[in-house]
Image (cartoon, coloured by chain):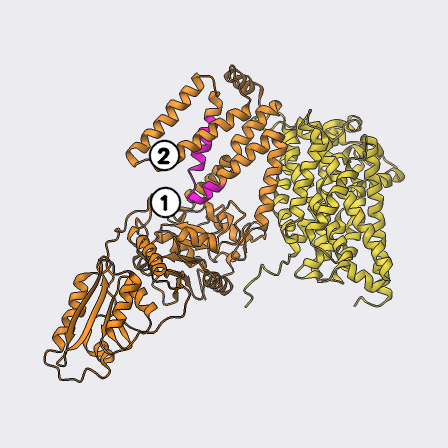
Chain colours: A yellow, B orange
Amino acid sequence: MNHWEYDDNKIEAKELTITVSSMIIGVGILTLPRVLAGTTSSSDGWISILMAGAFAVTIAVLLGKFAGLYAGGTFFEYVRSLVTKPVAIVITGIMCVYFMLFLAYEIRAIANISKTYLFDRTPAEYIGLMFLLIVGYAASGTRIGLLRLNTMFFPIVLVVTFLLLFFSNSIVNWADLKPFFVTDVKRLMVGAKDSVFSMLGFEVILFYTAMMKRPKEAPLAAAVGVVIPVVLYVLIYLICIGTFTPWALQEIGYPAIELAKEVKIPGEFFERTESIFFTIWIMTIFNTASMALDIAVHLAHSIVRKGKRIHFVAAICPVAYLICMLPKNVIEFALLGEVISYMGFLTIGMTLCLYGVAAVKGMIK
Amino acid sequence: MLNRMKQAGARSRIQRAAGREPNSEPLPLRTDMKSNLDCMLAITGSPDDLIVRHFTIGAQHLPVALMFIDSLVDKDLVQSQVMKPLLQHYENAKNDLYHQAVQLVVEEVLTSVDVEILETQEEVLNTILGGDTVLFLSGSRQAIAIGSAGWKSRGIEEPLTESIIRGSREGFVEDLRTNISLIRRRIRNPELRIMTFKVGRRAKKTIVLIYVEGVANRGIVHEAIRRIESLDIDDIEGSGTIEQWLSDSFMSPFPLIANTERPDKVTGALLQGRLSVMVDGDPFALVLPITFSSNLQSPEDFYQNWLLATLTRILRLLAAAIASFLPALYIALLEFHHGLIPSKLAFSIAGAREGVPFPAVIEAFIMETTLELLREAGIRLPKPIGQTIGIVGGLVIGEAAVAAGIVSPIMVIVVAVTAIASFSFPSYSFAIALRILRFTMMLAASVFGLYGIILGYIMINIHFVNLKSFGIPYSTPFAPLYLDDWKDVILRAPVSFLKNRPRMLQPQDKKRLNKK
């Protein structure tokens, strides 16, 4: 009999699904409706989101299969067995930097949005620093603890989002969704590219599959984990279009949060629901940020193989903080987001190449 | 209780006086009875209540001596079970007592059930200090211990700290035997295991570990045994000390081991697959392992209709949220986010705060601190005066503070609701943990408003997921997720639905109902 079912620190498929979903849902969706309103006409953005979703699910399944190859080991060790050591270090290093930038982006985003919706006087630097400290505290705990935090926060965020969508039913003008299918394919593709940007993050499968009890379930779990945000994105997008009309939507900074502003909660205890909504949304942004930091730490640790986790947390956090404070304005910040997105594509491309190498070497049964 | 503590204190003094290292090798008894007795008297400093009764037994007039502590033994018992048989039996006996005297006395003479043969000074001392009587026989290297402990102990009463409306009225007392009997009477199961440990270097105190074999997870049982055996203290003060020694982490305000005065609570826990630890001389039993949700449960939940019980549990969860976050929320809304308050309410709050010289932060800290002071004072004062404190504190200070314009009436409402909420938990140690959290959250809210509160909330959760109680994650069954256990966490499903023991405890016997 197995006395310690907990002590093996393993996760199940449902937990991987939640992990992938929590990683994807972050800052991206808050701005996505605006971006799509700019690139596609009428309410056709949903096609873009679905196209992006199909792409993301495919990649996620492939990454899940790749990750299943080194269950129990680390990414770096496996890559080293595929290619030479310097190449492995470069690949792992790029991934590490990517996740560090991801963390920096999330911190800056939270600082910016908090300044817009919660504070007017507190400087963004302090807001970001506090958030980073909490993320650092989480990352210096156990890795399994981080995944359990996802399990605790994700349902809350999901319930609140669905409540928001449900209550906004009354303010949506469904006629605004018409006409359908008026955008040409090229613009749909641009929209799809933008949507994929806000779905990045599912690369976490590469690093958390190793902690699964049954790694074979990873591809399916990852696919479901991507589908949940896709459905959520489509719903939020359509309701935003219906509430604000496509023309007004282009001018709204964070449509998903503004949606909360418009919603009338029965009882009307709280006047400005958007502050409450964003406050709860911080939980999922926190999940994204803490996992990004955790993976950056994990990758750096697997290359150096010395020291403790907490040393790497202490090393990476200040760097991420400096990077996140670099952009001087919203435009530069958007540029940082774009750089990160392209890096995301790069990491996915590299991983798929490695999958090819593994196939050539005959390491896939 | 007091007796026992004095006794333990006396013992450590004795050892220092006798110049013995508490850790030295046990010294065997000698053949010479007089030197044995002298030795005991020297070590204990021959106190007045240490009685030595010399007499002779048998036809050969074998000199023997009884030794016991007057204040700890039941003298009737010593007379009827020890003296009487010893003196009567040998009036006409012709047996040769000089050979195997100890054997004969034990097997043929003594009528007491509780008899043991001792060979070292250490054992003799422990026996005497434990309230038993020791019989020395001349010319023997052994002594006989006869159970005779009997002192005044408190009767079984209703527990003061955990009163419930429906259910058993019995509570634990200071006497370990009575406590064990309270458990045994409830679980008449041959698989009930009661393991005894003697812990303490200067004074041995009895600790028992109770669990149900075949139900409790063996891993947890082994871990508990390992931790109890690793205890190396010179004297145990009570279950509170043991709780801190056995606990997984001392860096947490949350209780990782529950304590209770209620036998029915312990019984329920044992049957779920948990363990219990009891210390002699302490009416609080420890229950382990526990999770966050255990703090919100009361044995009463199982005695009532499930609808009522579920409602009560949701109410307690709400109370936990209020007790930890309400004052912080008040500060955040008033200092940072006026916009969030509905405009009509905002006007009335502003009107009420007219003339209050302090910001909401200071106001909240003043009132909360006052409340904590009142609560502390209420506990220390004798019962009849305790009520006065309630009236003086609640009415007079509240009214006067508002009238004097130091705090606003809204603040008084917030503080009062928080206080009521924090009194509604079945577990006192959990309420204390929430007190600490409340002040931390107030601090966070006063610096960062709502943002501070949510960061604080996230931080508490990070703390939760890293906490363990005897290997069981504190955050189960929420994370790791065990949906089946939810039936008995926030909800309390109808009894016929609770077919399984909590899976989070990994019991050996998973089923509770409908076994096939």
| Placement of B463 over or under A161, stated as above or below | below
Residue with the most extreme left position: B92
Q: How far across and how far down the image is residue B40, in percent?
A: 28, 66
Magenta-colored stretch includes residue A48: no
Q: Is residue B171 visible?
A: yes
* Disc 1 chain ID: B
Same-chain status of marks 2 and 1: yes
Q: Which residues are magenta?
A: B413-433
The circle drawn on residue B162 is: 1
Q: Quadrant of the N terminus of chain A?
A: bottom right
Q: Mark 2 highlights which residue?
A: B378
Q: How far across and how far down the image is residue B110, in percent?
A: 20, 73
Res. A218 image quadrant? bottom right
Secondary structure beneath dot 1 equals loop
| Placement of B442 over or under B410, stated as above or below | below
Res. B272 image quadrant? bottom left
Please report whichever mark, 2 or 1, sits nearer to the chain's N-terminal start: 1
